[in-house]
Amino acid sequence: MSVRESDDPEFFARIQEQNLLRQYDLLTNCIEIGLKKDIEAFDKYSLWALNYAAVANIAQFGGRFREQPIYVGRHIPPHFNQVPHLMDQFFSVIHENWGTLDHPTLLPAYALWRMNWIHPFIEGNGRTARAACYYLICMRNGGLLPGNKIVPERIRENRGPYYAALREADAYWADGHFNVNALADFLQDLLKAQLTEA
């Protein structure tokens, strides 16, 4: 069963907002588990659950990696056959670099950019990428963070710089380089705003 936006945009928006609340509750649980078990608890099963929560009743294939082509504006994500391998690499990069980077939002920025680049799900990629990003921010800071408006909400409200930073990271990648510094700085500013307004 799913609700189509074209049938009733207001009802669809309400279901989507309820999903985001459920996703945040689940994210809170995932963070608490991660704090007990360390970064190895961050895995594909966590992402599948977060994606399912984000798209319940609005998409039929939530909670599993896509098995068909998908197009996102001008970006053509990798072939669906590559998604499992690319996501294995994604987790390896995070796990292997967890204790080695000083910048507090560099790995969260990597997660946010890379998930958007791979687009592993049919629907809810942005919502799931923002949840993963915030999971890593909280893990880096040793717990759930105070603030009435958390980083994922701030990203949703300030999409211009977010999209620009994603495009910049894409351009570096297309030239054979890795650089998510602009996105990391953007996230750091949003995190400071969240903590300042707590």
Image (cartoon, helix red, strand yellow):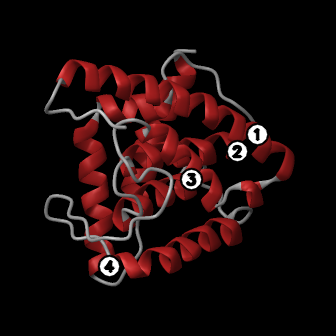
Disc 2: which residue? 139
Answer with mark 3 or mark 1, whichever residue precedes in sequence: 3
Q: Residue furthest right?
A: 36
Q: CA distance from mark 3 to mark 1?
A: 20 Å
Disc 1: which residue? 142
| Label 2 packing within 10 angstroms: few (<14), some (14-19), many (20+) | many
Which quarter shows the C terminus? top right
Do the residues bearing badges 3 and 1 touch, measured as CB atoms within 8 Å? no
In the picture, measured across the screen, residue 33 lies left or right of residue 196, that is right
Disc 4: which residue? 79
| 189 in relation to 103, above or below | above
Q: State the residue at coordinates (46%, 51%).
A: 184
Residue 187: x percent and y percent? Answer: 45, 42
In the picture, measured across the screen, residue 91 lies left or right of residue 51, that is right
Q: Amino acid at mark 4?
A: His
Residue 101: x percent and y percent? Answer: 65, 62
Q: CA distance from mark 2 to mark 1?
A: 5 Å
Answer with mark 2 or mark 4, whichever residue precedes in sequence: 4
Q: Residue furthest front?
A: 1
Answer with mark 1 or mark 4, whichever residue precedes in sequence: 4
Disc 3: which residue? 47
| Label 1 packing within 10 angstroms: few (<14), some (14-19), many (20+) | few
Q: CA distance from mark 3 to mark 2?
A: 15 Å
Q: Amino acid at mark 2?
A: Met
Does residue 141 show up?
no
Q: Amino acid at mark 1?
A: Gly
